[in-house]
Image (spheres, rainbow, N blue to C red):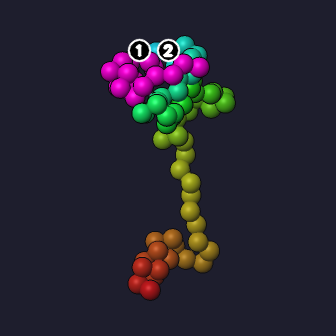
Amino acid sequence: MTTVTLTELRSHASDMFTRVENGETLVVLRHGRPIAEVSPATHEGDTQPSWQKPALRLTAKGAELSSVILEERTR
């Protein structure tokens, strides 16, 4: 684990993220105090980004969802 200042991270972001990509963990300091830890992402077998996954389907029994939402807004 390597410590870097926030200024160093901003100035050399590309190099720092290359180090993280190669497996290194960085602790970011601001005024000498740790504020963040940047570590390599873990892959849990899920290669599809969240924005490409199917959306959650919402349903309401006995009525269309849009009419339920409109009814709630008028209350």
What separation in Å lies between label 1 and label 2 (alpha carbons)? 6 Å
The crowd level at tag 2 (other Cα within 10 Å; few <14, some 14-19, many 20+) is some
Residue at 41 percent across and 84 percent down: it is: 74
**Disc 2 secondary structure class:** helix
CB under 8 Å between discs 1 and 2: yes
Q: Would you say residue 4 sits in the magenta stretch?
A: yes
The residue stretch that appears in magenta: 1-17
**Disc 1 secondary structure class:** helix
Where is residue 36? Give x, y as percent.
Answer: 51, 34
- Left or right side of 42 for 13: left
Q: Would you say residue 67 sits in the magenta stretch?
A: no
- Left or right side of 40 for 66: left
What residue type is disc 1 on?
Answer: Asp
Where is residue 34? Give x, y as percent.
Answer: 51, 33
- Left or right side of 8 for 57: right
Dominant SS in magenta: helix
Where is residue 60? Give x, y as percent.
Answer: 58, 72
Screen quadrant of the C terminus: bottom left
The crowd level at tag 1 (other Cα within 10 Å; few <14, some 14-19, many 20+) is few
User: Quadrant of the rendered structure where residue 57 is?
Assistant: bottom right
Where is residue 30? Give x, y as percent.
Answer: 43, 33
Q: Tell me the tag on residue 19.
A: 2
Q: Tell me the tag on residue 25.
A: none
What residue type is disc 2 on?
Answer: Arg
User: Could you tell me how many numbered marks the image carries?
Assistant: 2
The residue sitting at the right extreme is 44
Front residue of 40/36: it is: 36
The residue sitting at the left extreme is 11
Q: Tell me the tag on residue 15.
A: 1
